[in-house]
Structures are given as C-alpha cells and as structure tokens.
C-alpha cells in the first residue's frame, strides 16, 4: 500500500463520518432533544426565582 492509498482511505472514512454526523444531527428529527438542551441554560434562573419567591413568602 502506498501513501496515496492510505490517504484516500482516510479521506473516505472522514467523509463517511461527516455525512453520518450530519444525518444524525439534522435528519433524524432530534428537535426535542435540541430544544431541551437549549433551555438548560435557563434552568438555574427558574430555580433562583422560585427560591426568591419562597423567601419573600416566608418573610410575610
């Protein structure tokens, strides 16, 4: 096997991996997973608001 053959095989493997990743990400209807992951950032804010509301009610 020459260097050119190895390079060609490596290129094909990377291309197949890239296409697989694109299919897995965009075609397999993973919108609900992405929406959930996008809202993880706001989870701490909701907890903080609930704690503040609870503290305000406890002070009354």
Image: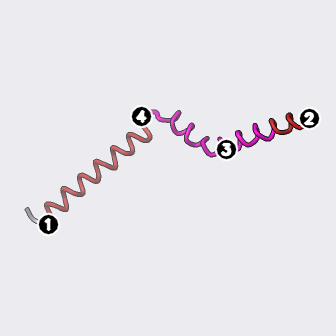
The first of marks 2 and 3 along the sequence is: 3
The percent position of residue 34, horizontal first and vertical second, equals 52, 39
Marks 2 and 3, how far apart at CA: 25 Å
Q: Nearer the viewer, residue 2 or 57?
A: 57
The percent position of residue 32, horizontal first and vertical second, equals 53, 33
Q: Which mark is residue 60?
A: 2
How packed is label 3: few (under 14 Cα within 10 Å), some, or many (20 or more)?
Answer: few
- Furthest residue toward bottom: 3
Residue 48 location, quadrant: top right
Q: Which range of residues does the magenta coloring cover?
A: 29-53
- Furthest residue toward left: 1
Marks 2 and 4, how far apart at CA: 51 Å
How packed is label 4: few (under 14 Cα within 10 Å), some, or many (20 or more)?
Answer: few
Q: Is residue 16 magenta?
A: no
* Disc nearest the viewer among 1 and 2: 2
Q: Is residue 34 magenta?
A: yes
Residue drawn at 76 percent across, 40 percent down? 49
Q: Nearer the viewer, residue 42 or 33?
A: 42
The percent position of residue 36, horizontal first and vertical second, equals 56, 37
Residue tagged by mark 1? 3
In this picture, residue 6 sits left or right of residue 27: left
Q: Which mark is residue 44?
A: 3
- Indicate the secondary structure of the residue bearing disc 3: helix
Marks 1 and 2, how far apart at CA: 77 Å
The first of marks 1 and 2 along the sequence is: 1
Residue tagged by mark 4? 28
Q: Main secondary structure of the magenta part?
A: helix
Marks 4 and 3, how far apart at CA: 29 Å
The first of marks 4 and 1 along the sequence is: 1
- Its colouring scheme is secondary structure
The first of marks 4 and 3 along the sequence is: 4
């Amino acid at each position: 096997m020459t260097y050119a053959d190895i390079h060609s095989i490596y290129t094909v493997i990377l291309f197949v991996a890239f296409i697989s990743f694109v299919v897995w990400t965009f075609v397999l209807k993973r919108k609900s997973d992405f929406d959930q992951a996008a809202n993880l950032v706001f989870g701490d804010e909701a907890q903080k608001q609930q704690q503040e509301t609870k503290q305000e009610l406890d002070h009354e």
